[in-house]
Amino acid sequence: MSDVALLVGEAFSPWTIKARWALDHCGVDYLYREYTPGLSEPWLRWKLNRWREPVSVPVLLTRRQAVLGSWAIAQYAAQRAGDARLGDMTDIQTWDNISELGLAAARTRVVRAVLADDRALDESVPLLPSGARFLLRPVARRVAQRLDRKYAHLAWPHAHRDALVSLRAALARARSGYVLDRFSYADITMSVLLEAVAPSSGPQVLGPAHRACWRNAELATEFADLLAWRDSLR
Ligand SMILES: N[C@@H](CCC(=O)N[C@@H](CS)C(=O)NCC(=O)O)C(=O)O
């Protein structure tokens, strides 16, 4: 393997956004490879030599190790930076736990919205021209059903909204414009909760049917202040 690490992820995914943002903020060089659920899984299992346990992305493959999951990747980035530019990761873990609970609920909502929308299922098939994608719709449906089964046990009702309420309270408490007294990984991990309110990815990353599945109109109205805050961060 080359000296430059390889980040494997899904460009639209809040967890991949967390990992990329942490690596970029810490000035860590890496290459990026897009992951397609189902299709890319055998390759990732082979790279990780992990044949039984579930695999998910993001994963950072370095010459020495495989760093699994956004939190471990952020810690790796902080170590590589060698300073406190992501903040005190011990304090921030609580925020990451809140973010993970909220995102788990959001993920199950989105996967079920995709399952209920043939256009979104067709968009998940990357290899065929758009007019022929319906042919693979049953395969796309099976992949989405598998994702639903894989992650549904982590989804608690209201956890997404609860996490947004906690974010709003933290911003009001800190009065710095950030979750803590200055920009840190707490802002990264909490702001990506808004990907499942109004996604920030452009059309080259998220097709129109998927964008509609990620969007939550009710939460977008209730948390318009947090969307404006998210947009001001980048
Ligand atoms: N706790 C993990 C969660 C990662 C995660 O949920 N990944 C999903 C993104 S939607 C995934 O890999 N989905 C594709 C699959 O499971 O095949 C992290 O922080 O990285």
Image: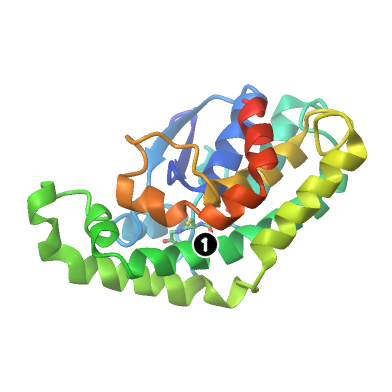
In the figure, is residue 234 to the left or right of 114? right
Q: Residue at x 59, y 64 (%)?
A: 104
Identify residue for label 1.
Answer: 107
176 relative to 147 in the view: left or right? right
Q: Say which quarter of the image contains residue 183.
A: top right
Estimate the x, y position of residue 59 in percent, counting from the top left: 52, 48
Q: State the residue at coordinates (60%, 54%).
A: 219
Question: Which of 64/132 is in front?
Answer: 132
Residue beneath the point at 65% across and 73% down = 156
Res. 187 in view: yes
Tag 1: amino acid: Arg
Location of the N terminus by quadrant is top left
Establish whether ligand 1 lies closer than 8 Å to the Cβ of label 1: yes
Q: Position of residue 129 (x, y in %)?
A: 10, 46
- Which residue shows up at 65% across the image and 61% down it? 160
Q: Is residue 81 above or below residue 35?
A: above
Q: Is residue 219 above or below residue 1?
A: below
Side of 140 relative to 159 (left or right): left
* Numbered-mark total: 1
In percent of width and height, residue 21 lies at 60, 33
Residue sitting nearer the eye, 40 or 18: 18
Nearest to the observer: residue 169 or residue 88:
169
